[in-house]
Amino acid sequence: MKMKLMSALILFTIVLSPYVRAEENVWTMAESEKYGTKAGGMLGRGVVNVATCFVDIIVHTVEGTQDGPPFVGSMTGLGSGLACGALRVSSGALDVVTFWVPGFNGMSVSRSYSNCLEPEEESIQPTSIPQAPVYAQPVQPAASQAPAQEPQKNVYDYVKK
């Protein structure tokens, strides 16, 4: 049984290895429209999520203890960590089981362990440094058009002595 499992794992690694690129990560690969890239990305993302689901519990418990009262913060952190860990392990298991299904990209969980429901933001990398636009100097109003400024009043004038 172990030999069949190891053989299948080695076969998947050999078949999917050409699709792994250095410039992409498993999260972007899992969202790809190409089947081979998507399958490898989903399998990798699923394995990472299942293997690291316990990190959510630790991170949330520590952050809850730091943010709130010692006991209450620890318990709320532990609760949210358990919920995020369960979400991460179920997402990872879904990815591992369904990576081969064409057109299905799974359920993605945030890469951040401090907030598992945080939406992923696309990283925008500029190709060149943008130049600041050059604007014309603002036109100063003429002296006759400038509004008259009222003299400043002293607040102590209104206080009875």
Image: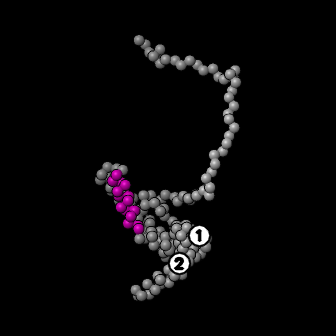
1 and 2 marks in contact (CB < 8 Å): no
Q: Residue at x 38, y 59 (%)?
A: 59
Q: Is residue 59 found inside the magenta-colored segment of the image?
A: yes
Q: Magenta stretch?
A: 52-66
| Residue placed under numbered mark 2 in the picture | 17
Quadrant in the picture for residue 140:
top right
Image x and y of residue 131, in percent: 64, 48
Q: CA distance from mark 1 to mark 2?
A: 16 Å
95 shown above or below 117:
below
Q: Callout 2, which amino acid?
A: Ser
Q: Residue at x 52, y 59 (%)?
A: 120
What secondary structure is the stretch in magenta mostly built from? helix
10 shown above or below 154:
below
Disc number lying in front (1 or 2): 2
Q: Is residue 35 left or right of residue 155?
A: right
Which color scheme did the rendering employ for the protein?
A: one colour
Image x and y of residue 8, in percent: 47, 84
| Residue placed under numbered mark 1 in the picture | 32
Q: Residue at x 62, y 58 (%)?
A: 127
> Which quarter of the rendering shows the N terminus?
bottom left
Q: Residue at x 46, y 86 (%)?
A: 7
Mark identifier at residue 46: none
83 shown above or below 161:
below
Tell me the SS state at disc 1: loop
